[in-house]
Each structure stands twice: as structure tokens, then as C-alpha cells.
Image: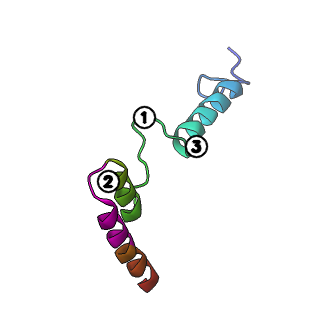
Amino acid sequence: MNYENYYWGMNIIWWGLWMVLLFWIFAIPYDIPGQRRKKDSAFDILQKRYAEGKITESEYYDKKKILEEEFRKS
């Protein structure tokens, strides 16, 4: 048998397809179900709580002011 154009049982086209697939799975930054994603910042959480109605407008602005002051310190 002549295995000149085969690499461990697969020709070069299949290895290329596997590399593209692995790159797509691990390197593309889209939201793929089950993929780890960046944690929400404190400001994002505050905005979500305000949008859901869990805190009032005055609480939102008070906490936003505190977060902005903390951000300026660091």
C-alpha cells in the first residue's frame, strides 16, 4: 500500500477541517452554549437589578455614585 499522501490515516484536507473546527470552538468569542463567559461587573449587576425593579431609582443613583467613586480610586 502507498501511504504517501496520508497523515496518520487522514489526508491533509481532513486535518485542515479539524483545525478549523477546533479554532472555531475555542477561539471565536461568540456566546456558544456551555462556553465560559466574562463575569458581569458590579455596574452591570446594578443596571440589571434596576431594570428588573428590585431597587428604586434613588437606590440606583446612590449605588452608582459609590461605584463611580470606587472606580476613580483604583
| Display colour scheme | rainbow
Decide which of tag 1 and tag 2 comes sooner along the chain: 1
Decide which of tag 1 and tag 3 comes sooner along the chain: 3
Span of residues in magenta: 53-64
Mark carried by residue 28 = 3
The residue labelled by disc 1 is: 33
How far is disc 3 from disc 2 in space, using C-alphas?
30 Å
How far is disc 1 from disc 3 in space, using C-alphas?
13 Å
Left or right side of 49 for 22: right
Q: Amino acid at mark 3?
A: Ile
Q: Amino acid at mark 1?
A: Pro
User: In which quadrant is the N terminus drawn?
Assistant: top right
Residue 61 belongs to magenta span: yes
The kind of secondary structure element at disc 1 is loop
Mark carried by residue 49 = 2
Q: Is there a contact, CB below 8 Å, between mark 1 and mark 3?
A: no
Left or right side of 67 for 26: right
Residue 66: quadrant of the picture: bottom left
In percent of width and height, residue 4 lies at 73, 24
In percent of width and height, residue 38 lies at 43, 54
- SS majority, magenta: helix
Closer to us: 72 or 16: 72
Q: Is residue 14 above or below residue 29?
A: above
Q: Amino acid at mark 2?
A: Arg
In percent of width and height, residue 12 lies at 70, 28
How far is disc 1 from disc 2 in space, using C-alphas?
24 Å
Decide which of tag 3 and tag 2 comes sooner along the chain: 3
Q: Is residue 28 above or below residue 41?
A: above
For image coordinates 48% across by 36% down, the residue present is: 32
For image coordinates 71% across by 17% down, the residue present is: 2
Closer to us: 20 or 2: 20
